[in-house]
Amino acid sequence: MSARNRRLQVEWVTAAQPDAAGAEWLAKVHKQLLADDSIQFDLPTLAQPEPPTWLKPLLDGLGKIGPYMIYLFWGAVIIGLAIIAFGLWEAWKVNRRMDVEITGPFSVTPVNA
């Protein structure tokens, strides 16, 4: 068997096509579907439920401070960036190279090997 014949054999299958009578019936039913909006396209509208009475003052308060929430958001972003910058600064201070100063009776000299 050659390399060309070892390939996977693919059989093309087409979708079943309706005959002339089936095509006419399908066209008629489709036209009827499009003409009658109540079949599936007439959906009932959603009625918004009223919030409970104990929740109404909280929602009203949130509605009043809503326009100012953008300032709270950006303030939190700035504070978060300041915390990250402070953490990086402190990490840099802890990890920077320190000069080693040896005092005592011993000296440090390079070893020639």
Image: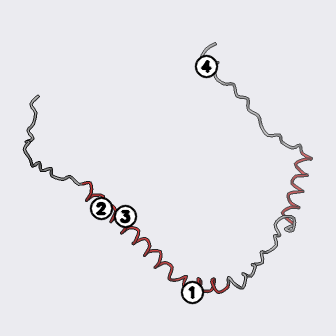
Q: Is residue 18 above or below residue 90?
A: above
Say which residue label 3 marks.
84
Please tell me whether mark 1 sits on a helix, a strand or a loop: helix
Look at 9% across and 47% down and name the residue there: 104
Look at 47% across and 78% down and name the residue there: 72
Residue 33's spot in the image, x, y percent?
86, 61
**Marks 3 and 2, the one that precedes in the sequence:** 3
- Distance of mark 2 from mark 1, alpha carbons? 41 Å
Quick one: label 1, few (<14), some, or many (20+) residues within 10 Å? few
Say which residue label 2 marks.
90
**Marks 1 and 4, the one that precedes in the sequence:** 4
Viewer-nearest of discs 1 and 4: 1
Say which residue label 4 marks.
4
Asked which quadrant contains residue 5, the reply is top right
Please tell me whether mark 4 sits on a helix, a strand or a loop: loop
- Distance of mark 2 from mark 4, alpha carbons? 67 Å
Say which residue label 1 marks.
64
- Distance of mark 3 from mark 4, alpha carbons? 62 Å
Judge left or right: residue 86 versus residue 25: left
**Marks 3 and 4, the one that precedes in the sequence:** 4
